[in-house]
Amino acid sequence: MIFESHFLSMVIYAALVAVVLALLRRKDKPSRLKYGLFLFLAMAGGALAFGWLMYLFTL
């Protein structure tokens, strides 16, 4: 494993996917930035929420 933290790996993956999708799906720079930021926050926040939900089932 490259990183010791799964969280860091997830954040880097979310950032890379958000950049690629923003470049592919939007034409102008302001909308690319806004869309990429939205995707990053949605993926990172969704992963944190899902991880927290899975943690509740281990108690």
Image (cartoon, rainbow, N blue to C red):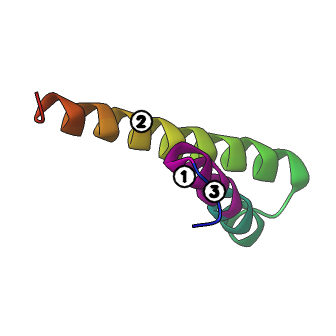
Give the residue at x 30% y 40%. 50
Q: Which mark is in front, 1 or 3?
A: 3
Let me know if residue 8 is in the magenta part. yes
Res. 56 image quadrant: top left
Decide whether the magenta segment is chiefly helix, strand or loop.
helix
Asked if residue 43 lies left or right of residue 24, the reply is left
Q: Nearer the viewer, residue 31 or 1?
A: 1
Quarter that holds the N terminus:
bottom right
Give the residue at x 30% y 31%. 52
Q: Name the secondary structure under disc 1.
A: helix
Q: Residues within 10 Å of mark 2 (few under 14, many from 20)?
A: some
Q: Earlier in the sequence, mark 1 or mark 3?
A: 3
Residue assigned mark 2 = 48
Residue assigned mark 1 = 10
Kindly report the distance in space between the C-alpha atoms of the residues bearing marks 2 and 3: 18 Å
Kindly report the distance in space between the C-alpha atoms of the residues bearing marks 2 and 1: 9 Å
Which residue is the extreme one toward the right? 29
Q: Amino acid at mark 3?
A: Phe
- Point out residue 8 in the picture as x, y percentages from the top left corner: 61, 46
Q: Is residue 20 above or below residue 11?
A: below
Which stretch is magenta?
5-16
